[in-house]
Image: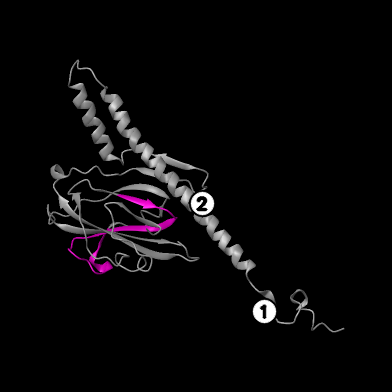
Amino acid sequence: MGPAAFMWPPDREWSANMDNTAPCGSSQGVGNRTEFPLTGGKIALVDQDESYDVQVGIAYQNDPQSNADFNVLIASSSLKELAEGHTCVSIANPPDTVSAGSNATLQIIYTADFDSPQNQTFYACADITYVLNQDFTTSIPCFNATIDDGESSPTTTHGSSSATASSTSAATTSAVSSGGGSKGISGGAIAGAVVGSIAGAAILGVAAIWLYRRHQKKNRAAQIERSARNVKWDVLHPGRDNASQNTENIPM
């Protein structure tokens, strides 16, 4: 993946030589489509390096070919920075002309200085097919777990963004409570286990990204140091003492 990507729905295959190419940053065309709810849709984004001015768009076409084919769902002014880790984002419902069975492609456009001294524009796309909410059975891995800019340690935040976790917990609690005096694990305990498992996965994911980023920075620093050591200074001015090369024109 590049600096950022769709975690859900899964995006098209990433390639380093195409991730700066509009509209989808991939050499792969439309492939497998992910079922997506007609209303109340959310996307899960993952970021491994600072990303800025993130724009989320959608094309209600089978095979969009340019940025002009996409409608803006979230303007870059509303998502100025994507923190490292996992971020859950709610998106607007499609227009009435879109129904169950309609195809669409989600797009993110953002800037980052990933493996480069200057900012570049990156693209990623995820292909979807809309389904009725009652037919949507996927548990969206949507949660917020990001790393502080100071890199001291990963931090995890949970809230209403994890709609699937909340609905699952509520349904489980209701089902157990309706059992009357039946013995077994309480609804609260089951709900806690569901939310706890999501929190654990979030922390592990953020910690992995944090460690990876620290490793990448150490590698870059080591490469710079090795490059400086390998410079053959005597080649620049053969036969001259480089330590005193600026003194030969001083009058005696």
**Image quadrant where residue 167 sits:** top left
**Region of the chain picked out in magenta, as a range:** 44-72
Instruction: Give the residue at mark 1.
Output: 235
Q: Position of residue 91 (x, y in %)?
A: 26, 50
Q: Is residue 56 magenta?
A: yes
Say if mark 1 contacts mark 2, CB within 8 Å: no
Element on which disc 1 rests: helix
Q: Identify the amino acid type marked 2.
A: Arg
Relative depth, front residue between 149 and 97: 149
Tell whether position 187 is magenta. Answer: no
Quarter of the view holding residue 244: bottom right
What crowding class fits label 1: few (fewer than 14 Cα within 10 Å), some (14-19), or many (20 or more)? few
Q: Reply above or below: 220 against 65.
A: above
Badge 1 amino acid: Val
Tell me if residue 69 comes above or below residue 171 in the rendering.
below
Lateral position of residue 131 relative to residue 192, left or right: left
Q: N-terminal of the two: label 1 or label 2? A: 2
